[in-house]
Every structure is written in C-alpha cells, then in structure tokens.
Amino acid sequence: MAVSFGTARNPGGDGHGGGHGHGHRPHDGTFIEHPTVKLYVQTYVLLLILLVITVALYGIDLSRWIPWHGINLLVAMVVAVTKAYLVLRNFMNVKGSTRLIWLWAALGFIWLLLMGGVFLDYQTRVNPLGWQPERPSLIQTGPRSPEAPATNPAAGVATPGDVPAGVQEPAPEQTPATSHP
Amino acid sequence: MSLRAVTAAAASASRGGDHAGGDHGGVMTPTLYHQFEDVEQQNESYLVGMWTCLVQEIMFFGALFLAYTVYRAAYPATYLDAHKFLSITWGTVNTLLLLTSSFTMVMAVNANQHRKTMSVAAWLSVTILLSLGFLGVKTIEYSNKFHEGLWVGNFNYAQANTMYLQHHGGKAHHEAKDVYPYFPSVRELATGYSLNSVQPGATSTPGVEMTPAGPFTSYQGPPGDVEYWSKRAKLFFSLYFAMTGLHAVHIIIGILMMSVLIGLAVRKHPYVTQDYMPTEMVGLYWHFVDIVWIFLFPLMYLIS
Amino acid sequence: MPRAHYLNADHSIKSWLLTTDHKRIAILYLISLSVMFLLGGVAAAVVRLQLTTPHGVLTGENYNKMFSAHGIVMVFLFLVPSIPAAMGNFLVPLMIGARDLAFPRLNLASWYLYMIGSLMTLGALTFGGVETGWTFYTPYSSIYSNSNVTLAILGIFLAGFSSIATGINFIATIHKMRAPGLTWFKLPLFIWSTYATSVIIILGTPVVALTLLLVVLERTFGIGIFSPELGGDPVLFQHMFWFYSHPAVYIMILPSLGVINEIIAANTKKRIFGYTFVAFSSIAIAVFGFIVWGHHMFATTQSMYASMVFSVISFLVAIPSAVKVFNWTATIYKGSVEFSATMLYALGFIGLFVIGGLTGLFLASLATDIHLTATYFVVAHFHYIMVGGALTGYLGALHFWWPKMTGRLYPEFWAKISALILFVGFNLTFFPQFIAGYVGMPRRYAFYAPEYQIWQVLSSAGASVLAVGMLIPAFYFLWSLKYGKVAGSNPWGAVGLEWMTSSPPPTTNFEEVPVVTWEAYEYHPIHDDDKDMTVPSPTAPAVTAEERNAS
C-alpha cells in the first residue's frame, strides 16, 4: 500500500526572515513588533528619572509621614519593579512578542515568589532563626527522684554570644520538675 | 512544478544565507538550520530558548535574594549599620553605567535589524566600555573593602568602624543605634568591645535581662554585644560579595559574548550581517543582567 | 533494516563525538548513564555488604563515603538525566514529527557538560570521597568536613547545567516544532510528561546550583551564609536545597510515568483512558511538587505551623499521581492485554509505585513522620519510587524502544525472566527495610543494634537477586545488537509517529514531514468512513521508501 506524506506547512515557501526592522510575520498569525528608536530613548530617559527618584527618596525618611518602618524599602522596591518592568517591556520587547514569551517572563518572576514560602517557616518560629533557644529546653535532664534536686534547665545552657547565664524563666514555662517542692 | 519541488526550491534558496550576501532588496536571509521549516520558526524557537534560559537565571539569582531577604528580616539592625560602608555614589554611578549600557545594547540590536553592521559594532563597543567602567568601579569598591577589613577572608569590623569614624571626623550621624537601641554604637564597634560593664572580649553580659522576643520580632541579642553584632555584619558582607560577585561574573560573560559579536560584525560574518537573532539574544541576556542590578542596588545600597 | 540509517551513516569517532544528531547523542548518553549506573550499583553493593552484619567491614568514615557516593551518583549522575537524556533526546523529535531538536549543538554541549561534571564528581568520590551524604547538609559540608566536597559539588554544578540545557531544548522543541496538525491534545503522553519534567528542571535546578555554590564559597572564601557562628541558619540551606530536590524527585519519576502510558497503550491496543486528565496531572505534579519541600524538614527547627501546611499539601500532591494510576487501570480493563516483557515492567511499575506513594503518605503525616523520619522506612519509601518506579520505567522504556533505536529485537523470554527476577529481588531488598525502619533502625548508620540484623540480611540477600536481574538485560541487549532478530518499523503495532519511520530511523528521521490527522493512541480509527487512503493511518503498518521501491 502506498503511503504518502504531505507537506502542508509552507505551500508557497517563504524562506526570508524579517529583516526590515519593523517586525516579521510568524506562521501562526502573531506579529512580532520591534519598537522604534524613539521608544527606546523615552524608556531610557524614564529609567534615569526613576534612578534619581530612588536615590533622592533614600535620603528622606518617609516614616515621618507614613508611620511604618518598612515604608522606605517598599517605595524603593516599587521603583525598582517599575524600572524592571520598563526594561522588560520596551527593551526586551516582551510587549511585542508572542504570548508564550510574555507567559514565560511572568512565570519566572511569579515562581520566584514561591521561594517566599520559606517565610512560612521563619515568620512562625517561636525562636527566631531557631537555633538559639531563648527559653531553656523543656526536656527534663537528670534524675527525677525526690531527693535529687531538679536540674535547673537554664543553668549551663549559655554558649558564647547566646543566652546569658542566669536568665530567669517566666513561671508558666517552667517544667513540672522545677515546681517540685 | 509539484508542491514538493516548490517547497524544496524555496527552502534551498533560504538555506545557507551566505551566498552572494543574500541581498534580496534589503531583506536578511539568515542561515536556516535543517531542523527548522522556515526562519520564523527558527527565530521564535531561539526566542523561546533564550527566555527559558533567562527564567532559569531568575531562579538562580532568586535563591540569593531569598537568603538576603531572610537575613534582612531577622537582622535589620545589622543591615542598616553595615550598609554605611557601601558608597551610594559609586552605586549610583554603577546603576547609571548599566542603564546606559542597556540603552546602547538595544540600539545595537536595532542597528542590526536595519542592517547597519558597523553601527552594530559601534554600539556594542560602547556597551562594552560602559560595562568595563562598571567592573572598574566594582574593583575600586572591592579594594576599598579589602583595605577597610571588610573582606570575608580577613574580616575585622572594629578596624572598619575605626576607619569609618576617621573618615567622618570622629562621629557618625544616622547610626543604626538611633533606630534599634539594642545595637551598639559605631564608637563601640570601633573599639571592638562594649563600653558598658562588660570585660573586653567577653561575649555575654551576666545578669542583664534580655528583651523577650515574641513570634518573630528580630532577635535582639544581648544589648550592646559588639562581637555578636560584628559577626552578623560579616553575614551581611558575605551576602554582599556573593551577590555582587555573581553579578559581576555574569557581566564578564556578557562582555565576552559582545566581543565575539563585534568580531563577527567587523568581519562581516553572516551571523551579524544576515541575522539579527544572535545580537537580540545577547541583548536579552544583557537586559536581564541589568534588571538584576536594578534590584541589587536598592537592596544593598539604599537601606534606610 | 533500512540500508542507510543514523547508526551507519558515518563510522568515524569524530562523527560520533561531534555529532549533532539527537539520536546519536541519546546513544552517547545511554552508554554514559549505564556506566554511572554500574558505579552507583557497586557503591550500593558495598553498602549492603557492610550492613549484612552489625559491625560490618568498613570504618564509619568509609561507610559514610560509600553511601554518599551511592546517593550522589545515582541521583545526580543517573536518575536525573536518565529518561530525559537517553530516551527523551531520542524520542521527542520523532514523536512530534521533527527532524531534530530545536538546538542540536546545545544538545551536544549538554552531553559534554555532563561528561565533564561526572568525571569531576567521580574523581572527587574516588580520590578521597565525600562524607556528607548526597544532601550536603550544612554546617558539616560547609565548615567541618575534610572531604572532597568542593570538587564533588563543582561536578554536580556542571551536570546541573547539562540538565538545564536539555530542559531548554525540550521546551523550545515541543512548543515550536510539532508537525502540522499535531495539536497539544494529540501529543503522546510521554511528550506531556517530558514537557512537565523540563519545566521543573528549568525552575528548580538553578536554585540547588546556587545553594551548592554557596557551600563551595563558604569552604573556599569563608563567605558564611549558613554558618551559625555568624548568625546564619543551617536550616536555610535545607530550605533552599529541598526547594530543588523535592521537585527533583518529580524530575526522576515524571518521565517514567510518561513511558508507562506508552507501554500500556501499546500492550492493550487501547487509547489511554482519561487522556486529558493524565496530561494535566503531569502539569499538576510539576506545580504541586514545588510547594511541598518542607516535608523533608519536619524534624528540624522548622516551625510547627509551616510543617502543618507542608504536610497538608504533601497529601494533595499524591492526588495527580493517583489520577494516573486510576486511568491506567481503566485503560487495561477490557483491553486486549499482551503480557510482553514491557507490559510486565509496566505492571510492576504500577504496583511498586503505588506502594511507594502510599508509604510516602505515612511520611507526609506529621505525627508518624516524627517516628519514621531518618529511619529505614524513608530509605525503603524512596527506593520503591526510584527503583521500583523510575528505574523500572527506564528499563521498560529501554525494552520498548530498543527495536526502534537499534533495529533489533531482544529475546523476549529472557526479558520476561529478568523482569520477574527484578521484581522478586527488588521486593526482597526493600520491603524488609520498611519493617526495619518501623521498629526503629536509623538510616546512614554504619553499625547498628543486633536486633535489626534479620531485616538487613534479608535486604542484602534481595540485593544479590536484584543485581542478577539487572545484569541479565545488559547481556541480552548487547547480544541482540549482533544476533537479535531484525525488527521492522513497528514491531509492537503501536500508534505513534516514531513507529512510522524505519528502525533504526534515518538521520533526518522522516523522509517527508508528516501531517497528523489522527488522535493520540488512535488504535481504533475514529473516522472510519471518510478515511483517505493516501493519508497514513496509524494502525496501518508503515512502509518505508525502500520497501515501497522494492514492491
């Protein structure tokens, strides 16, 4: 039985890529536009203005108007994101490219935010950064017989630079053994 | 002519775009590789490939930004204090250089699209000059850090703070202590030990009650403990060198790629005369490197 | 066999080492991967030898180096590349009707990166060794270990970039180079899996590359990001490491899941039930796999609240895998089942993968994990998935596409025997480890309490059987290259573009670009009445040009 394959893709055959600077027509109907020099210059000027704004705002303590210690950081980040967006859209031509490129660019930054899941851990730890216990261990060490003194869990825990020796524990946190009469 | 023959003829006409310069009335004829059906598919594939590479680079730098953010949230006082050693001037100059290089890069791509090969070489050369300037500024900054004792190999925070006070006439305005009272003053950091009732070299303050920290308020540590906070400053500088160092490595790679392009342009190689995709792809990479710096600059230098 | 195909196109060494033909690169990978597997297997054999008695034959330090070598070689140098590099490189262009991948030279570069990285890592492991385990936990790896951590990590770094290059290639190819008429939902499910795998590779590998690089920087320059003395958090390393390494296990299993689709469809002569669900489940696994990394850290200082969230999501991530298993059973039901060797591998896969997945749930649940973590239960769990799942899929793929790659058939009888031996040996090796872990034996211990010995002896006995089961295919595959029966273009009567070209395929894959008008797995043609006899039918045997000219 004869089997034939057909080439249905490019009946006319166009091997010429776009080269005249104003975009080229991909086969699936989307059109990749290339921006003009004017847009490039405008974007560049905008970027410079934003740079000046960032540095100027650094010198001003914005928390005098908006009472939050992170306001300066937030403003700086907003400006940075704007600059990045301008570069992405105009210099990297995400605006003029296919939807797939746009999707990829967006996905990259969104995926980055996933790593922020780490803060699920760090924000909810009782002991910040975890490895320096402020409160002594709740695990009873030493014998639990009546005549042996209950070990003060706070003693001997201090390591250089960490919990100073002799820190008193607030009562509710005490282990049952230390309340043994 | 059969359908197949027409296709084959057109395809072979576009393959090997170096025949007679391919001057079909100002239209470029890039080399069509055998796995692609037409140039549009080839160009789009290259774009998808380059963007995928950039997404991967976002995650690469992103991990460092994550470490930065975790430690900034935990030790804001350290960050505020340590960043005083970073020169805002040099940082701004660097940002300026890099933004301009992004502009010249995109002009180079534009020139390539308009088939102005020598303009391509010119714009790319300017881009390289600007980025060499960036690297030069970085070298100045790094050597300053080395002399101040902030290099991770021979870290000496006391020495750094002493030199800082010397440069600023003996007193520091806008100390971290103003915002975070538990942080030692710059004078204390310069001496290397706490000025209250702690022995030199001791690292814990007996009998001093610590401020209890609740769920994730930043760990305040024993008040005024200089050695404790000096070590955290080393953490900041570890991140600083890791991030800016990695960024500088990417700049160097970019410079190498651009040099190759200039070489090709000067020799009128078809990769530049008949195709704008190589330049565009290097351009995409360069803009990405610029974006990383756009975020690095406020996060490292503009901490307030 | 066709007279001119990709294997005999040119016999010189240069044509092989500088090839850009994706099929040849796949063969290069196949050879390297087999060597890596052998080396990792030798390390495993030494580990099992040590564990047969409570006091063993090695020092503690050397045992640490052995299991680290086994883990590093098997995970980074074998499993992560395995199916994507060896089978994916070969099959992706064929399955979508393309002449090659999008970036053939990048493909070759990825092989060289892999070879250089592997040699560096193997060098580090051989001359001095690494004691940290394949997980390189800080601060041991960054500060205290005196072993070849830096060199090993740099090798893994390069191998990681090889992986990324492969991922970039696949993504661009699958998006842009499908044959005309081949829409996304007509693609073979192996392509869907490969695509999902590539997405995971792109989004995850750079993170671990950077994390390991930071360890190297700490060892070399003193840049202490994870050093507790400076205020750093060693657990941050674990966060960043597992952010990749959990999706990495999906990199290792997803391609196998894709392969099983192909094998089952071909051996039941039926369309995969619930095609759309299976396709999207691959994407779901890729997405969900990125948000469960904390379940490796339940016993660290990670907060309880974060652990609870990760635990819940870890339960959810089992669902897409279950979706696949349900759809396979529905496919097999009332299918015309052929118990060929490849089908035996597929059926073994389903059983072992289910056991591995279910035992993962014990580990995902916080309360039981506190008891089971860092015991042999975990070891058994991931070996059920990695060996019982990923490796079985790899072997099944090798058998299924061996005729296509080499033009020869392997001996079916011996293939079935070795599949059965593998199944028995595998279960004997790893099922006792579940029990050992449950009764409390910790993992990564060179010396253990005598009460665990019975389980370890059973396990070592099983390992010898397993080794036999792995060695037999090596022999008959090599034998088949010269003496095997010549395979036609479609020995299994399967539906797929790769079966419509000769075995082995010509260098340009297809003589003319195919136009796809049929659905995926269209074993029973849907549009029977308006069948155009000049358009190739997937169920009709493909006729190559030579056969056509001969008649």
Image (cartoon, helix red, strand yellow):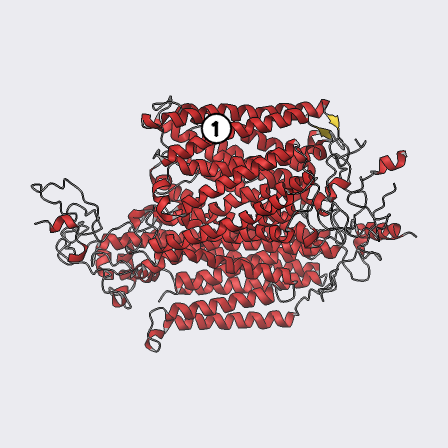
Q: Is residue B97 left or right of residue B204?
A: right
Residue C303, x across and y down, in percent: 33, 53
Figure label count:
1
Along the line of sight, which residue is nearer the eye, B275 or C501? C501
Along the line of sight, which residue is nearer the eye, C191 or A90? C191
Along the line of sight, which residue is nearer the eye, B71 or C378? C378
Quarter holding residue C136? top left
Rendered view: C464 above or below C374? above
**Kind of residue indicated by mark 1:** Leu
Q: Chain of mark 1?
A: C
What residue is shown at x 66% (from left), y 47% (from top)?
A: C272
Decide if residue C147 is in sight here.
no
Rendered view: A107 above or below C455? below
Q: Quadrant of the C terminus of chain C?
A: top right
Residue neighbourhood size for the residue with mark 1, other residues' Cα within 10 Å, grouped as few (<14), some (14–19), many (≥20): many
Quarter holding residue A21? bottom right
What residue is shown at x 45% (from left), y 32% (from top)?
A: C431
Residue C357, x across and y down, in percent: 49, 43
Quarter holding residue C62? top left
Along the line of sight, which residue is nearer the eye, C367 or C255? C367
Residue C358, x across and y down, in percent: 47, 43
Decide if residue B228 is in sight here.
yes
Q: Is residue B70 left or right of residue C105?
A: left
Question: Which residue in the protein does label 1 denote?
Answer: C428
SS at badge 1 = helix
Residue C53, x across and y down, in percent: 37, 22
Outermost residue to the bottom: A65
What residue is shown at x 91% (from left), y 51% (from top)?
A: B2
Q: Is residue C493 left or right of residue B190?
A: right
Q: Quadrant of the N terminus of chain C?
A: top right
Q: Is residue B118 left or right of residue B16?
A: left
